[in-house]
């Protein structure tokens, strides 16, 4: 599901906010920062924002997942919008 984040957007991330079901979050997966939608039910998972809609289940007992913060705003450059073939995440 597209959330309106264009390639190259500037994101405002609040590390003090507690993520809730459906929050767009910055998480650390295998040492890389990624943007995902947090799903808490029926099972905890991170959902990709792209067309593929990959869902990665989270095992709370492993403790390997790090949520850096919650994305609160996206600032998109609309000057270059025509050059984006598939512009949104």
Image (cartoon, grey):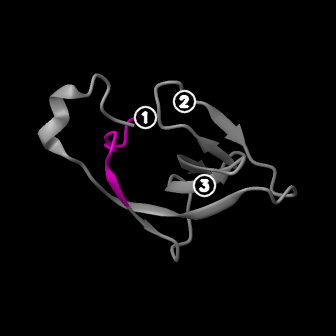
Q: CA distance from mark 1 to mark 2?
A: 8 Å
Which residue is identified by label 1? 1
Q: Kindly check if marks 1 and 2 are in contact, taking CB atoms under 8 A apart as contact.
A: yes
> Is residue 86 found left or right of 83 in the rendered image?
right
Q: Residue 57's mark?
A: none
Can I make out residue 40 in this image?
no
Q: Which circle, 3 or 2, is nearer the viewer?
A: 3
Other residues around mark 2 within 10 Å, as few (<14) / some (14–19) / many (≥20): few
Other residues around mark 3 within 10 Å, as few (<14) / some (14–19) / many (≥20): many
Which residue is identified by label 2? 53
Q: CA distance from mark 3 to mark 2?
A: 16 Å
- Mark 3 falls on what kind of element? strand
Q: CA distance from mark 3 to mark 1?
A: 18 Å
Name the residue rendered at 63%, 45% in the picture: 46
Can I make out residue 58 in this image?
yes
Name the residue rendered at 55%, 62% in the picture: 20
Which residue is identified by label 3? 27
Name the residue rendered at 28%, 22% in the picture: 85
Mark closest to the chain's N terminus, 3 or 2: 3
Mark closest to the chain's N terminus, 1 or 2: 1
Residue stretch rendered in magenta on the structure: 1-11
Name the residue rendered at 69%, 45% in the picture: 42
Other residues around mark 1 within 10 Å, as few (<14) / some (14–19) / many (≥20): few
- Find residue 39 and report its horizontal and vertical position in percent: 61, 49
- Find residue 1 and report its horizontal and vertical position in percent: 43, 34
């Amino acid at each position: 599901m597209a959330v309106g984040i264009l390639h190259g957007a500037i994101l405002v991330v609040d590390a003090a906010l507690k993520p809730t079901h459906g929050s767009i979050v910055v998480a650390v997966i295998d040492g890389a920062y990624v943007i995902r939608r947090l799903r808490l039910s029926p099972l905890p998972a991170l959902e990709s924002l792209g067309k593929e809609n990959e869902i990665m289940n989270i095992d709370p007992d492993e403790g390997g997942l790090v949520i850096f913060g919650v994305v609160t705003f996206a600032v998109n450059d609309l000057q270059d919008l025509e050059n984006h073939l598939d512009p949104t995440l």
